[in-house]
Image (cartoon, rainbow, N blue to C red):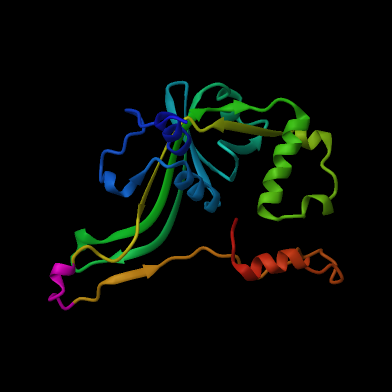
Amino acid sequence: MSKLSTDCDINFPRTDRSRIRREPHLGSYLRSDVYAVVDASPLCHIGYVIDGAPFVTPTMHWRKDNRIYWHGSIGSRFLKQVDGAPACVTCSLVDGYVLARSALNHAVNYRSAMMFGTANVMEDLDDRAEALRDFMEGLFPGRWDTLRPVMEKELRATSVLWMDIEEATVKARTGPPSDADESHVPVWAGVIPMQTMLAEGQPAPEASASTRLPDPLAALIASGRLR
């Protein structure tokens, strides 16, 4: 295999649109780095241009290989107009506040992936059901088969969209403040970590007391894992 083809397998292409200009040392074009942020993030923001105006919508997402999926209501005026349109999907995670000895040296430790491609609306109902199953199983393994079967009218009311990731970059910051040379200033400096984690399940008010939280969900909550 040539070096060029190897690079294409490992990295997303660097283009004028995706090239990291500010603090490029914090960036990466590695597919594995992009996928790691996408898979860890519980939420994404999707940007479109509709009728000449920009719109950004938050939604949950899931990934299969180099394709990212999201869903919404079939009645959304956005989703009706974006089929075949350029889209930008961003996933971000904040890992901590970085407190320095001067205000303008404060920062955050973060991971952020920005992806570009073309939005596509999934038309086939069986394909929608399979994609939504992947979504559910990615969050709660084994749960799909325990639920009431999805009805056709529910599938018809749900849009599923997908985008092959054509270009993507990751930026991330880790570590302490960058002002060690000002250690003589008598101000506390360091990192306050930030974590998003699962908490104890709260049953629906109408749920029977005999219907207990399934063991897989209890284990997932105990692990604190989001995805």
Q: Is residue 195 above or below residue 76?
A: below
Looking at the image, which is closer to me, 56 or 41? 41
Residue furthest to the bottom in view is 186
Region in magenta? 180-186
Assign the C terminus to one quadrant of the image: bottom right
Left or right of 24 in this view: 216: right
The x, y position of residue 111, in whole percent, is 41, 52
Instruction: Name the residue at the front extreme.
Output: 1
Tell me, yes or no, if residue 11 can be seen here: yes
Q: Residue at x 48, y 49 (%)?
A: 37
Q: Residue at x 43, y 44 (%)?
A: 113
Above or below, 209 relative to 120: below
Image coords of residue 151 (percent x, y)? 84, 38
Residue 208, quarter of picture: bottom right
Point out residue 155 in the picture as x, y percentages from the top left corner. Answer: 76, 35
Q: Locate residue 54, reporting x and y percent.
A: 43, 30
Q: Is residue 181 magenta?
A: yes
Q: Is residue 13 magenta?
A: no
As drawn, is 30 to the left or to the right of 161? left
**Residue drawn 85% across the image and 49% down it:** 148
Vertical comparison of 105 with 191: above or below: above
* Viewer-side residue, 75 vs 210: 210
Q: Which residue is at a point 76% across and 37% down the rendered structure image?
A: 129
